[in-house]
Amino acid sequence: MRKIHIALSVEDIEVSVVDYTQRLSCEPCVVVPNEYALWRTDEVNFSIRRSQSGQQKLRHLGWEDSSAKEFAQSQDVNGIVWENFAASQQDEEINRIWPRESVK
């Protein structure tokens, strides 16, 4: 099964979590306070990460794909980065960047 992945940079994680929780009608499955949040719904894999530059923007797009054997990344003709990964590969990346003790 494939679902679209959307990753955004945001200025304020806490305010954004409230907003996107309402928009997606569900709580995030991962929250790293003041750094990152992830929602997995039947339709979308949606993540936000605190902006290092203070600008809100699209970080990348992609596919959460249960058949993905490994993480892959490419650029489309417009320069947009696309990732392809299994949920377990995304979880491993989250755990590598933010050890479990910092994740809610």
Image (cartoon, rainbow, N blue to C red):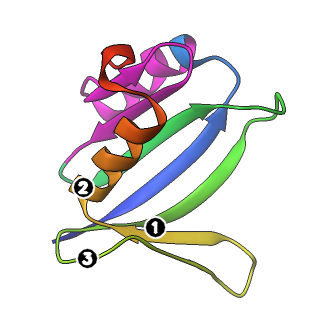
Q: Earlier in the sequence, mark 1 or mark 3?
A: 1
Residue at image position (53%, 49%) is: 7
Q: Is residue 23 magenta?
A: yes
The magenta region covers 15-41
54 up-or-down from 2: above or below: above
Tell whether label 3 touches label 1 (CB within 8 Å). no
Query: Mark 3 is on which residue type?
Result: Ala
**Along the horizontal axis of the image, is 10 left or right of 46?**
right
Secondary structure state at the residue bearing disc 1: strand
Circles 2, 1 touching at the beta carbon (< 8 Å)? no
Instruction: State the image quarter where residue 32 is shown.
Output: top left
> Which amino acid does the dot numbered 2 rest on?
Ala
* Location of mark 2 (residue): 87
State the separation of the CA atoms marked 2 and 1: 12 Å
| Residue position for label 3 | 68
Residue 59, image x and y in percent? 64, 52
**Image location (x, y in percent) of residue 95:** 35, 37
